[in-house]
Amino acid sequence: MKDYRVLQQQFTVNSYPDRQITLVKGEGVYLYDQNGKKYLDMMSNYGVNIFGHSHPSITRALNDQLQKLSVLHGSFNNDTRAIASEMLIKRCGDPYSKVYWANSGTEAIEAALKFAVLKTGKKKFIVCENGYHGKTLGALSATSGDKYRKPFEKLLWQFLHIPFNNEKALERAIDYDTAAFIVEPVQGEGGIIIPDDGYLKKVREICDKRGILLVIDEIQTGVGRTGSFLASSAEGVSADILCLGKGLAGGVPVGATVVVQSVADAIPKHIHTSTFGGNPLVCAGVIATLKVLTNQTLQKVKTLGEYFIESLQSIKSDKILDARGKGLVIGVVVNVQHRNKLLKLMQDKHILVIPACENVVRFLPPFIVSKENIEKAVEAFAACVDLL
Ligand SMILES: Cc1ncc(COP(=O)(O)O)c(C=O)c1O
């Protein structure tokens, strides 16, 4: 059999770490390598495959749309795009009014930045230390961390990085030139950091009081990941601009920038478009995903998430420094030198988990995960920790 790992490493740009396995098929909570070896997927492709792999109704919807019409420029109207847009706006609820369709999370952020400038006429943004918003140049300006930024500095406009979970720092940072504050409800890539209760609410109040826009990045936390459709609305908070991505289209590439009417009114024609944005194929994935994502599923994410986090917390080892999360976005903090070893040891046990920041093992399982799957993963993780 051809060694596809060697082939991929030879012909793709070397900007990703090599996890050393070649996965060729997915079914439910499992991924399969080229020799048919089965892996329990506890990462759902960084949070994309929220209903696992080859979900019957999502796959059917994508197949059906593929046979009808796959791509159609946004200047033409389309039934599937119209329905997906209406469904998403209704699901996001008040005060959201319109969506701009992009093709990835980072593109959703790019649109958010431009829309904020169009609405306010200002180019100064406040963002959080440890925050992650993507790697294209605009989004990278909002993203924290020398690792990603250093070679490209000086980056875009003016981005002021303040501590997360610190509303006083936000108050101090806002000035006349500030367009918006951009924040994740839970910092994902930054290490699954959950702010204090009420932080987001205080942030909303400050933004209102000081007349700046609030951009909430729910690319990782949105679409059910924390046990509510939006982590922010569960806290009674809405954004002026909301960014979504990851699992929204059931596994095909998507980004969505959802705006309130006053922001929508500030966006002129032609100013921001994308050939592929909101294509009917992706929109069919959005419709199918929103249909499958019932309140019952959200409740399951909450309950299983609590069980998962408590089970990880109950592992007795001084190698585990913390275990935390919300719904099914979960992180275990370990020493920096142990993180990659744990990823590898888990992989050797045929369980796939991913990193976050320098010292966190991240679990982002699909929502179809069972209690038994979780028990298996926790048992394996405890055994791996013992091997350190
Ligand atoms: C909170 C957040 N924002 C933005 C992004 C960028 O999304 P993408 O990788 O689809 O460009 C990510 C990706 O992990 C994310 O977690």
Image: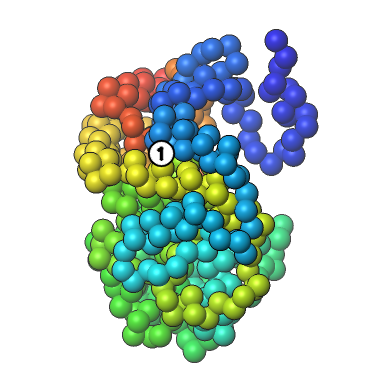
Exactly how many numbered labels are in the figure? Answer: 1
Residue 268 sits in which quadrant?
bottom right
29 lies above or below 230:
above
Q: Residue at x 38, y 68 (%)?
A: 96
Q: Position of residue 152 (x, y in %)?
A: 71, 60
- Residue farthest along the right direction in this orientation: 11
Q: Nearer the viewer, residue 279 or 308?
A: 279
Name the element at disc 1. loop
Q: Position of residue 24 (x, y in %)?
A: 58, 22
Residue 99 can be seen, yes or no: yes
Q: Position of residue 332 (x, y in %)?
A: 37, 38
Q: Residue at x 32, y 24 (%)?
A: 373
Colouring method of the image: rainbow
- Residue farthest along the bottom direction in this orientation: 176
Residue 333 can be seen, yes or no: no
381 lies above or below 98:
above
**Residue underneath mark 1:** 50
Q: Look at label 1 and name its amino acid.
A: Ile
